[in-house]
Amino acid sequence: MTSDDSQRNGPEGCELSIDDDTIASVTDRPLETQVDLFSTLGNETRYRILLLLAEADEPVCGCEIEPHLDVGQSSISQSLSRLRKAGLVSRTKDGRWRYYEPTEIGETLAALVESDVATEPLIAD
């Protein structure tokens, strides 16, 4: 058996489930967008903002968010910007005010994570 065969077949006695096409599809494609999306959600302030927006019945003015979080307006503005860049929220302008609402993907991700959190922990020991 050559070293190439042993890599494809795995260690002795181990049956591999991942075929070469699956490995190529994961390792060869760019993942920057997906990684940025999860990186964006990995910040507590940004995640809380997304949850607030997802629970709202209509678009929320950026100024309305600050009283509900223990961070300043600057941090909220930066977080909203990052959420927009990741495609998780959209913004509309009305004069000097900016209104935010979750995009379809933002709502879907928030609902998915929150439904799983309510039933069982996402991180196992």
Image: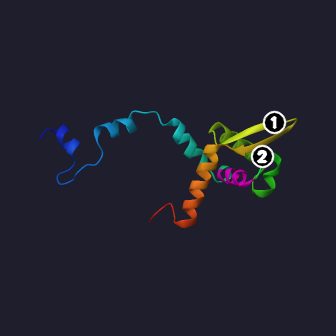
Residue 24 part of the magenta-drawn span: no
x, y percentage for residue 76?
Answer: 74, 47
Q: Secondary structure at mark 1?
A: strand
Q: Which residue is mark 2?
A: 59
Q: How packed is label 2: few (under 14 Cα within 10 Å), some, or many (20 or more)?
A: some
Residue 48 part of the magenta-drawn span: yes
Q: Quadrant of the N terminus?
A: top left
Q: Which mark is residue 60?
A: none
Amino acid residing under circle 1: Lys
At horizontal 14% and vertical 38% (from top left) the residue drawn is: 2
Circles 1 and 2 in contact, beta carbons < 8 Å: no
At horizontal 55% and vertical 46% (from top left) the residue drawn is: 38
At horizontal 20% and vertical 50% (from top left) the residue drawn is: 11
The range drawn in magenta is: 47-56
Q: Is residue 17 left or right of residue 48?
A: left
Give the mark, 1 or 2, whose residue is nearer the N terminus.
2
Q: Which mark is residue 93?
A: 1
Q: Secondary structure at mark 2?
A: loop
x, y percentage for residue 100?
Answer: 75, 43
